[in-house]
Image (cartoon, coloured by chain):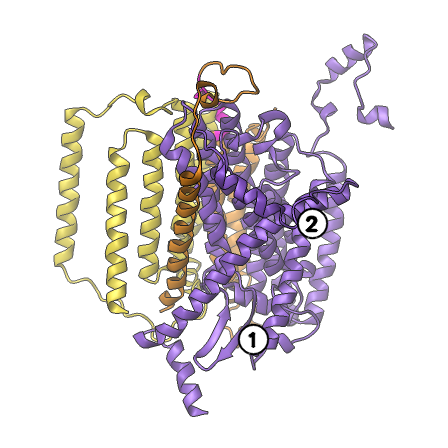
Chain colours: A yellow, B orange, C purple
């Protein structure tokens, strides 16, 4: 099982990175959006391998929808449907800044790697209901965060309506 | 570790993708291609196509997609709540999947009521603004 | 005896490699069986659809190829493989080819988590009659449904045909709108079952009442949403032939077209199976607990598989029955049904059921016959209220309600009688 697990980890990890690279380098926004879906899909596989099954499913469920919106936005509002239509908006400065941020992020990951993370010991007796692990803390200890999320969603609703109404 | 349950899924995914590619490939190999200019043009009920299909469309579609995400996330929050509801509405740990008599609590329902009430305000706002009106 | 118990234990212990072998062998058998049954089923469904349509319209239907037209699907399939593929000049080719696959793959993956019969005990351990027994089975289905929309939207967009694009856009808004109601209606199921594993949901229904009786409103919402998700009449606006030629697959031919067709029909199968599982006890045989407990024998498996097929086939028939009964929705009606009716109703219903469960718990009524009867009673009441609301035509408005009052008055003054207003009927 151990080898199999590792092989899968590397397959999905590499696929995720490759898709993410394709996402930023494709000129066609629709193709780019599709690569992003693939990235999310691979990430969800990685979550599931970490036994975070709920998050794995949610990753696909929410991001698939979210990317759909990006897609519609591109097709309908910006009218950038054709690959040839999109001008290369990324100048030299943009590239440099992006590279800088990338290096900083990479350095951060390397630093974190060196520290000893607290080892998560999985429960020997895994609960029959996989949701319990996430529901128990979410609806008790992090209750406030949960309730505040609804306010955040409300703000998003108002934002979406205002944006659409002003343009339309 | 329930990870092993996902092995069949991985296998099936490979199998289905292989089949999809095979079906298209087989069809591609057996067909005879005789392209003509008319055949290659967009079919618009027999009239020569006018202009490009890549026009701008109503912003409503975008708005619906946006609202979808928001309410989808709400559903996502309700799923763990619903599957954990029996425990949340019980003041003491469940015994045998049931709440011992006299220990029911309003906690589980109350927290979701607050959450939903705020989102109902959002729905009412969208409704009032006419964003759900299509005509 | 101990040896057998030991063998069973080895299978349930996931950490040791050799035990994987029987597990994977059974998985492959189940996988190929389910895949074949789905594809053959889809082929037969296309025939059934035509035959049932013919029966409803008092025609004969296909009856030339093979006995009673039975080989018609084979002939159609062969034809579609041999047909010429057309690629429109203006199409964005990579996505144009990818789109049918994106419709096909999730459609055939969804069935994997639906249990179709009771498990069998073998000497290698208990074999569940489901391709992948995921603990989050239900969420997996929701996730894959949200992926299903991509195939259609991308097909519409990449064809670069106005009708295709319109079809794709319509379906994106429609599927997305009804997905919420679908998700919310199933929250009620989760409230009652207390788990997201489909096996647990079936077991809970077998030991109490079917959710159809306990959660009738959720069932109706789910049913309507399932019709909308599969783009079937009365929700077939993405491919409304009188407006959009063929909608998103206008430019598709040969096998690529076939794949959309297979996807649509296998989505129908999955939706029917899901309705059966969530609301009609899945493979459970009603009025007996014989099928829900050990010892698991092959007879039980066959009997439960039959029960499951009967339920699924009924809903497949129901799909076709509805097709020839109800006319297509207008787009604004479709959207207001989804957002202004089903969404609020589903939200309120979740709270009502949660409160009811709390109240029953407080009264000390445990899940069982009495518990089910009370749930059922409340649902009948709620259904009555909802039907009165719908019947008043407040939300799903008739065409005449869209004309302004002054315009109607002007038309009347001119002596033009607007066709069939509600007043003119009465």
The chain carrying label 2 is C
**Above or below, C320 relative to C114:** above
**Above or below, B32 relative to C360:** above
**Above or below, C184 relative to B87:** above
Judge left or right: residue B44 versus residue C320: left
Quarter containing the C terminus of chain C: top right
Q: Are marks 2 and 1 in contact (CB under 8 Å)?
A: no
The chain carrying label 1 is B
- In this figure, which residue is indicated by the disc labeled 1? B100
- Residue B121: mark in rendering: none
Distance between the alpha carbons at the discs numbered 2 and 1: 43 Å
Residue B115 lies in the magenta-colored region: no
Q: Which residues are magenta?
A: B52-61
- Of all residues, the one furthest to the bottom in this rendering is C1
Q: Nearer the viewer, residue C317 or C184?
A: C317
Where is residue C5 drawn, in percent x and y?
43, 86
Residue B56 lies in the magenta-colored region: yes
- Residue C318: mark in rendering: 2
Q: Name the residue: 62% across, 43% down.
A: C342
Which element is circle 1 on? loop
- Of all residues, the one furthest to the top in this rendering is C414
Judge left or right: residue C184 versus residue A123: right
Where is residue A97 drawn, in percent x and y?
16, 32
């Amino acid at each position: 099982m151990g080898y199999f697990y590792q092989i899968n980890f590397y397959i999905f990890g590499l696929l995720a990175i490759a898709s993410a690279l394709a996402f930023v380098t494709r000129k066609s926004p629709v193709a780019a959006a599709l690569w992003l879906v693939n990235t999310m899909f691979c990430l969800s596989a990685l979550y599931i391998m970490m036994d975070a099954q709920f998050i794995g499913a949610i990753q696909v469920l929410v991001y698939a929808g979210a990317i759909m919106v990006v897609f519609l936005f591109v097709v309908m509002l910006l009218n950038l449907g054709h690959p040839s239509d999109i001008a290369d908006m990324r100048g030299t400065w943009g590239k440099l800044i992006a590279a800088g941020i990338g290096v900083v992020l990479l350095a951060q990951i390397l630093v974190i790697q060196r520290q000893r993370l607290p080892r998560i010991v999985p429960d020997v007796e895994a609960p029959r209901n996989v949701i319990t692990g996430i529901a128990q803390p979410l609806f008790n200890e992090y209750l406030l965060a949960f309730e505040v999320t609804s306010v955040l969603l409300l703000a998003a609703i108002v934002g979406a309506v205002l944006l659409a109404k002003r343009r339309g | 570790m329930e990870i092993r349950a996902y092995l069949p899924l991985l296998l099936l995914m490979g199998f289905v993708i292989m089949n999809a590619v095979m079906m298209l490939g087989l069809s591609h190999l057996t067909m005879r291609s005789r392209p003509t200019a008319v055949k290659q043009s967009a079919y618009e009920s027999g009239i020569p196509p006018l202009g490009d299909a890549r026009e701008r469309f109503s912003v409503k579609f975008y708005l619906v997609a946006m609202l979808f995400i928001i309410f989808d996330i709400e559903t996502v929050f309700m799923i763990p709540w619903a599957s954990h509801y029996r425990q949340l509405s019980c003041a003491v740990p469940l015994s045998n999947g049931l709440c011992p008599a006299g220990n029911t609590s309003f906690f589980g329902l109350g927290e979701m009521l607050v959450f939903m009430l705020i989102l109902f305000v959002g729905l009412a706002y969208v409704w009032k603004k006419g964003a759900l009106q299509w005509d | 005896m101990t040896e057998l118990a030991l063998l069973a234990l080895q299978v349930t212990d996931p950490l040791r490699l050799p035990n994987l072998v029987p597990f994977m062998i059974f998985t492959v058998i189940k996988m190929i069986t389910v895949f074949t049954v789905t594809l053959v089923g889809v082929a037969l469904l296309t025939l059934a659809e035509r035959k049932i349509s013919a029966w409803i319209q008092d025609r004969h239907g296909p009856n030339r190829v093979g006995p009673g037209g039975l080989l018609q699907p084979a002939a159609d399939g062969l034809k579609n493989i041999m047909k010429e593929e057309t690629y429109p000049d203006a199409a964005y080719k990579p996505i144009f080819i990818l789109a049918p696959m994106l419709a096909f793959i999730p459609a055939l993956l969804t069935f994997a988590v639906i249990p179709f019969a009771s498990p069998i005990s073998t000497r290698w351990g208990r074999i569940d009659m489901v391709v992948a027994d995921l603990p989050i089975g239900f969420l997996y289905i929701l996730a894959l449904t949200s992926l299903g929309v991509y195939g259609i939207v991308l097909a519409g967009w990449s064809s670069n045909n106005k009708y295709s694009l319109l079809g794709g856009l319509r379906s994106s808004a429609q599927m997305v709108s009804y997905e919420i109601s679908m998700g919310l209606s199933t929250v009620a199921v989760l409230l009652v079952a207390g788990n997201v594993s489909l096996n647990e949901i079936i077991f809970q229904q077998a030991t109490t009442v079917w959710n159809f009786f306990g959660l009738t409103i959720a069932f109706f919402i789910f049913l309507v949403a399932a019709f909308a998700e599969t783009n079937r009449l009365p929700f077939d606006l993405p491919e409304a032939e009188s407006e959009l030629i063929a909608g998103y697959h206008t430019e598709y031919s040969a096998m690529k077209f076939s794949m959309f067709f297979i996807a649509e029909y296998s989505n129908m199968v999955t939706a029917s199976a899901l309705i059966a599982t969530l609301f009609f006890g899945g493979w459970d045989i009603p009025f007996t607990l014989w099928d829900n407990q050990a010892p698991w024998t092959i007879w039980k498996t066959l009997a439960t598989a039959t029960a499951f097929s009967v339920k699924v086939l009924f809903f497949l028939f129901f799909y076709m029955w509805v097709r020839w009964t109800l006319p297509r929705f207008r787009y604004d009606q479709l959207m207001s049904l989804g957002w202004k009716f089903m969404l609020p109703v589903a939200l309120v219903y979740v709270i009502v059921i949660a409160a009811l469960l709390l109240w029953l718990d407080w009264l000390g009524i445990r899940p069982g016959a009495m518990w089910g009867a009370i749930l059922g009673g409340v649902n009948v009441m709620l259904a009555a209220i909802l039907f009165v609301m719908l019947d008043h035509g407040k939300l799903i408005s008739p065409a005449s309600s869209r004309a302004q009052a002054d315009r109607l008055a002007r038309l009347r003054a001119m002596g033009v009688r607007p066709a069939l207003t509600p007043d003119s009927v009465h």
